């Protein structure tokens, strides 16, 4: 699930949105030493799976499909590769005829390990290890909080070719309520106490803005237990928010080091606040352009998005 429209497990729920943002550091990290182990066979479009070992020793599980230049897809909150509603595996398949596409379980999710240190730097190091496994350079695509992570990595790593971002749910004006300054800290405290259901309720009501009654009804859905299994990772996504969910204009200096060509995308049916934020982000990035995808929401369809991404990554 991403930090904007309730997606994945909740694809049958009414539209609602959440926000993510960026940590305030753009110092480039040295390349992470990656130990790579691949398993399986990549035949007839079936993904090859493998493991990279991040700088801190955490094992990060990935899948690879297709041929061409490498592209890494970065998920938003409450997703891993195994979940039926996860958007990136389907997008990977749609892009695989022209690109070698990597999907992976962010730390603490799916088959990946975790050190329970809620630090953006560790997730950037995970991406650095994946880039190394991909051959030393790669393009990045991120959706929602995954886009915030991809943007952070592009500011720190010199090994990123092109960058595509879909609806990073920043809040840059008063068209919706801002995210509280203590949002990430409160989620971290709930995770520390293993209060998973409470963390989900707080995330959905305060972060996304869902009505409490709707969140109560979500408890009855089969997906609730799967969401609880990932609830401990919510602070990881919340740490990507910083003050870009504050309702204030985005500071251009924060991403001054992101010189890579960047495509910033929003759906025409997404809320005005999210579309406003994506226009603002494209304006402040040094080498970016803005694109609106007709008829799409935060629950973007791979068939609609894949042609736009494929064209951009082959320019």
Image (spheres, rainbow, N blue to C red):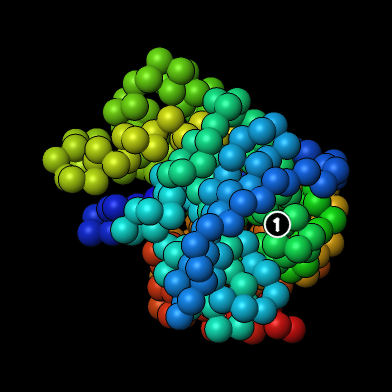
Q: Quadrant of residue 193?
A: top left
* x 28%, y 53%: residue: 10
285 left or right, relative to 198: right
- Work out whether residue 84 can be spotted: yes
Dot 1 alpha-carbon crowd within 10 angstroms: few under 14, some 14 to 19, many 20 or more = many
Q: Which residue is mark 1?
A: 133
Q: Nearer the viewer, residue 109 or 4?
A: 109
Residue 212 in percent (x, y) is at: 24, 36
* x 62%, y 51%: residue: 37
Q: Nearer the viewer, residue 36 or 164?
A: 36
Q: Nearer the viewer, residue 174 or 120?
A: 120
Residue 140 in percent (x, y) is at: 66, 62
15 left or right, relative to 56: left
Q: Nearer the viewer, residue 44 or 184?
A: 44
* x 54%, y 32%: residue: 114
Residue 255 in percent (x, y) is at: 78, 51
Q: Is residue 279 above or below residue 129?
A: below
Q: Is residue 171 above or below residue 262?
A: above
Residue 150 in percent (x, y) is at: 66, 54
152 left or right, relative to 286: left
* x 68%, y 40%: residue: 54
């Amino acid at each position: 699930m991403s930090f904007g429209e309730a997606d994945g497990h909740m694809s049958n729920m009414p539209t609602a949105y959440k926000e993510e943002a960026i940590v305030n550091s753009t110092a480039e990290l040295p390349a992470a030493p990656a130990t790579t182990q691949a398993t399986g066979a990549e035949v007839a479009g079936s993904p090859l799976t493998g493991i990279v070992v991040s700088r801190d020793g955490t094992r990060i599980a990935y899948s690879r499909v297709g041929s061409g230049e490498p592209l890494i897809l970065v998920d938003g909150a409450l997703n891993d590769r195994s979940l039926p509603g996860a958007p990136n595996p389907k997008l990977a398949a749609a892009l695989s005829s022209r690109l070698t596409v990597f999907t992976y379980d962010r730390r603490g999710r799916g088959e990946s390990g975790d050190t329970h240190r809620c630090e953006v730097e560790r997730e950037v190091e995970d991406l650095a290890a994946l880039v190394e496994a991909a051959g030393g350079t790669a393009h990045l695509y991120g959706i929602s909080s995954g886009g915030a992570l991809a943007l952070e990595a592009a500011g720190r790593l010199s090994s990123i070719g092109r960058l595509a971002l879909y609806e990073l749910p920043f809040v840059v004006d008063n068209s919706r309520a801002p995210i509280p300054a203590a949002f990430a800290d409160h989620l971290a405290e709930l995770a520390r106490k293993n209060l998973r259901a409470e963390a989900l309720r707080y995330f959905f009501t305060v972060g996304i803005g869902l009505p409490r009654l709707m969140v109560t009804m979500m408890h009855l859905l089969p997906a609730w237990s799967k969401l609880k299994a990932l609830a401990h990772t919510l602070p990881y996504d919340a740490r990507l928010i910083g003050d870009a969910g504050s309702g204030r204009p985005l500071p251009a200096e924060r991403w001054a080091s992101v010189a890579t060509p960047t495509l910033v995308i929003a759906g025409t049916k997404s809320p005005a606040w999210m579309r406003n934020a994506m226009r603002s982000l494209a304006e402040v990035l040094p080498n970016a352009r803005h694109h609106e995808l007709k008829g799409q929401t935060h629950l973007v369809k791979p068939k609609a998005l894949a042609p736009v991404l494929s064209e951009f990554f082959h320019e």
